[in-house]
Image (tube, coloured by chain):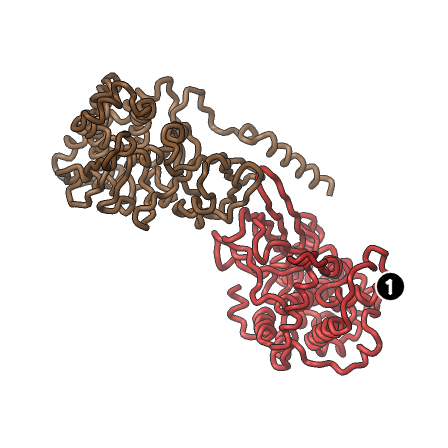
Amino acid sequence: VVLTVSDNRRNSLPEVRWIRTETPEVEQWRQLGQFRYSPNVRRYLNEHGLQPSPSGIEDYISGSVGQAEEYFRAAKIAPLDISPLLLYYGATSLLTGASALIRGYPLSINQHGMAISVPAGATRMSDVQVVVRNTSGGALREIAQVFGDPGDLPGQSRWSVGELLASLPDLKDDVRLCIPAVETYALRIDTIRKDLVDVDRIALGEFGTANIDTTLTRVVGFSHAYLSPQRVSEAIVLHRKFGVRPIGTESLSGQKVLQVAHDKSGVLCTPSQILAMLMALFALGFESRYNPTLWHPFAQTDATGERLLVERFLALTIRLLPSLVLSSVSQTWTRFTSEVIRPPRGLESLSEAELRSAVKEMVAEALR
Amino acid sequence: VRARESSAVGIAKAAFELCKSVVRMPQRQSIKTLLPDLQVAQHADGRPGRGGIGYFAPTLGGQFAGYVALDSRRASLNPALGALPAITADERALLVQAHREIRALNDACIGDLRTFEPKLSAAVDPYGTLGGDILRDSEVAAPPASLLLEEATVAAVAEAFQRSSLCDGIRAIPPAVRALFPPEKLSLAVDQLDVMLRRPNIGKQSDEFTAIAFQTSSSFPPRIALEYQAALVGLRSALRVLDQLVFQACYIDRLPALDSENLIKVDGPATSISERIVNVTIQPSGEMSHPKPGELAYFVHPRLGAPFNSLGEIISVRFEMSQETGSVIYLSLHLTDENLNPSPLYSSLARTKR
């Protein structure tokens, strides 16, 4: 079973692995880059009980990872006209290579597994739709086997670029500014530690104009993980059920996030951040390549006002996608920090409130 | 729990059967209507309720006794309590009847211990500290009616008590030790130990008990005296829990549960020589919206499961409301054994005999 680091349903926020670096973007590729070499691939497959593996798999993985890094490198300095396409190719290469590494055999892919549909009269990039094709050999479905859940991508379901970008917690504020009508698909959470218990809070503003109860019922796994929500003056307080693994995903900054499902003809779907990024990249790459009528005014004159949002999405993908893949490969949340990492040392790991409470308890006990 | 399930005549098992029969009794409906009504401070249509009665009654005595005592002593209560709304004559008759039935149940459970040692009756009476003036003469004289309790199930509970290790232990105490306690001293000693054992986290302070259990021989007279007191307190506590079980069965169909649907944090269960305690933090909801000390709840450990699940007596309650972390309730419970005894002191002493 592969832990996917961005899926509510799998309740799979694994341990955090901190890596100290001044340049996370370089470091994450340094970490992934080890799989450009056969001995490291062999070692990983051995350590994870995936040997014997099909012949040629080492080259498949090494080649995919190496090619992905070059695509990402090129996309970073490329103009907006071609960077989405480069990133889509890079993402596909990285995800197929990493899938093979995690599963121990290469993917059998002969098509994208998705198509593009532009609704009549659509003028905005966010209106462009990705149509999921559930045919065998489709890259999206194969990648979803490892980095999400294919059940979250029903065949013929349609996903607008706007809702895909809204699924990414790091873009939530940008999407809300640019596409006010889009629904809420990510709820950012502040976690307060009290009496050694984590209490989650969602600011009321996170729900926008959406109905709070309805929105929370669309968080897959919510009632399994949380007791009934409590409303206080500025937030919704969520107490975690005792003994249940926490659900949710993380933003790039490490903030906990609950993903709100998309309703696709009555099916609640929560694609992982990786799948949302891949689908959005496909749409933007396709439009830039094959639909200059729509792309040119958007890219050259920012006619729809979405250019900043798309640029931020591409920058986020460059930074976040390799990091999420690295987390899946290592089965731990991988976070980068430029601060000195110190292991927790007794009292230093306690907050002031916890220290005060502990001292009070000791004094009370001594006085009994 | 395993012990309770495997013991066909265990007190807890018989008590649960008794509660099921209470729930089936048609006469229960009038009490089921009355008790919640006495908890309502204000009705939905704005009419003032009688929540004050429900609030103060438990402070005067457990179960139905508190309501009867409140009504009987209305004239002598302080002005604030005296101003509480009245209970009608019919309602009082209902409460008195139920109280008398519970007392009769207790008498049946004590059984031949009353003749074995007459002074025991008062010492193990859960209502012993209440005073004898709460019933009017006419109520005492009236023949008891069967409102809630079926004869056969009462007999089964009584038999379970008679065959329990608690009653066996009391019978086994040498006469010379029993003679050390004249009636008034016996009740006082049982009262004091009962109060001590009902404090939360008493386990941390029971070094003396531990020393007696592990460092003295079973023939050491002070140890036997402690065993005697512990067995009597155990019997009284088991009766108290039984009475509360019947009381709660009168107005709710299922015991409230502390489980994955309300638990936020669980510390324990922790066991010492005199205490099996679990401290929990819950989110108030449903039947556990306003728990009170003395009430019973079924503790279901979400992580450790069946071996740690147990009926618990709530011994402390603290509500907390905050804009930062919402509403929570901190509870401490003493978990009961197969005899409904919420303190393991007697069984600890019996187990460490040498």
**Which quarter shows the N terminus of chain A?**
top left
Q: Is residue A263 left or right of residue A232?
A: left
Residue furthest bottom as drawn: B143
With respect to residue B58, does A209 lie above or below? above
Residue at x-position 79% and y-position 75%: B118
Which amino acid type is marked by label 1? Ala
Q: Which residue is mark 1?
A: B75
Q: Position of residue A188 (x, y in %)?
A: 44, 35
Residue A51 in view in this figure: yes
To which quarter of the image does residue A19 belong?
top left
Q: Which chain is red?
A: B
Picture residue at 70% right of the left edge, 56% below the top = B41
Residue A11, x across and y down, in percent: 39, 44
Label 1: chain?
B
Q: Which residue is drawn at the image coordinates 60% and 66% (left, top)?
A: B252
Does the rendering let one see residue B180?
A: no
Residue B336 locus on image (x, y percent): 61, 61
Q: Is residue B150 above or below residue A192?
A: below
Residue A25: give x, y in percent of width and height: 32, 21
Q: Colour of chain A?
A: brown
What crowding class fits label 1: few (fewer than 14 Cα within 10 Å), some (14-19), or many (20 or more)? few
Which residue is located at x 59 percent, y 59 percent?
B297
